[in-house]
Image (spheres, rainbow, N blue to C red):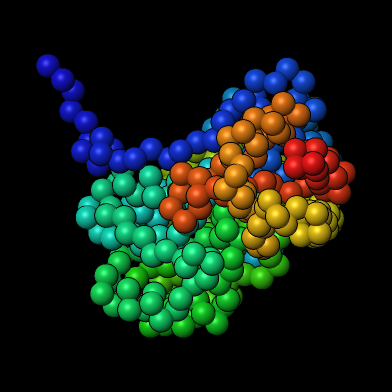
Amino acid sequence: MSIKVNKSVYNSKPYKLTTQKAWLESDKSKVMKLDWNESTIPPSPKVISSLQDLVKNGLINWYPNIQNSELVEKLSKYCNVKSHNVQYFNGSDAIHESIFKTFSDNNDILTIVGPTYDHPRSVAECFGLSIDFFYLTKDFDFNKNDFKNYMINTNPTLVYICNPNNPVGNIYSNELLSELLSEFPDSLFIIDEAYQEFYGLSCVELINKFPNLIVTRTFSKAFGLASLRLGYCISSKENISLINKFRNPKSINLFAQVAAIAAMDDLDYTKKYVSEVLEGKEMFINYIDSNLSKYITPVNGFGNFILFKLSKKFSPSDFMNFLEKRKIYIRNYSHIKNLENHLRATIGNKAQTEYLISAFEEYFS
């Protein structure tokens, strides 16, 4: 006798997680965890203070606030939209799940512009969607005309685009997105702006013009709240209302809600960190171009990370083992189509970047 298993779940390919070795380090204060694009520094002191107050005085025995109007208002102000255009979730991954469940049926097509973040693919497969990829060129360019022909021939129900794109770092302009949204009104475009703070631009302004647009964001990157899991989406009032039918409001814990409010009350802290990351990226790229161009080819993108390709005479696994001995953890993307021998490193502040550079210098010297 065997229990029944959902065929879509049974046949789906799991999302490939990176190593969890960093969590096994006894002294985590000496770890450079650069594999998941988290913030490399703690969140704002206001966040820490608010959480401490919540532990002492909060109603932890109650279910969390299921309609946190203060959080919604701060999000709407931050995004410059109406409060009915925004909703918060238990991380952006939970948003993607809600979108797939709300706006698709079994065997509908989800087009993913890749290579990109793979978790939406694995979740969509479990919901019974058919996954189809439109790939960037080998130089990581987006061929607009090829994509339009693809859309005409495929007619997907959903399209997922990460902007800036993880792990490549390429971007899609508002002019391009407007053109695609206009020409393919029957396809719902999910634009993942997890790294928007590092890019500085957004397509949120397009939601009032295009009902086939949903923008998703997270507090896990620039705001440093990855462990608390909070994300939000921005779309038309009608789309938000539909998503709320599936969303479980009790799943967004009070600690995350309180932390997000505090983080948005200290935007100067986040902006300072973003500025330091951008300086660190420039420093890292300049060093590679000036000293290691024979061994490494960097892809200078717009997130808080750098994708780079190792020369074929070097093994990504050996290089990662070398870094791990120095308590530096980065991510190997060699298993992804068009990313053979590619690795990705999160970029932190100046001091962290200098330490990362010193490890690269030691390995290639």
Quarter of the picture containing the C terminus is top right
Residue sitting at x 16%, y 20%? 2
Residue 300 or residue 64, whichever sits in front: 300
Picture coordinates of residue 53 (x, y %)? 78, 32
Residue sitting at x 69%, y 31%? 322
Picture coordinates of residue 99 (x, y %)? 40, 55
Q: Residue furthest right?
A: 351
Picture coordinates of residue 85 (x, y %)? 53, 65
Q: Is residue 26 above or below residue 249?
A: above
Residue 16 or residue 208, whichever sits in front: 16
Q: Residue furthest front?
A: 313
Picture coordinates of residue 311 (x, y %)? 61, 50
14 horizontally vs 345: left or right: left
Residue sitting at x 36%, y 54%? 100
19 horizontally vs 337: left or right: right
**Residue 281 visible, this angle:** no
Residue 333 or residue 228, whichever sits in front: 333
Quarter of the picture containing the N terminus is top left
Number of callouts: 0
**Residue 10 visible, this angle:** yes
173 horizontally vs 16: left or right: right
Q: Is residue 282 above or below residue 261?
A: below
Residue sitting at x 43%, y 53%? 337
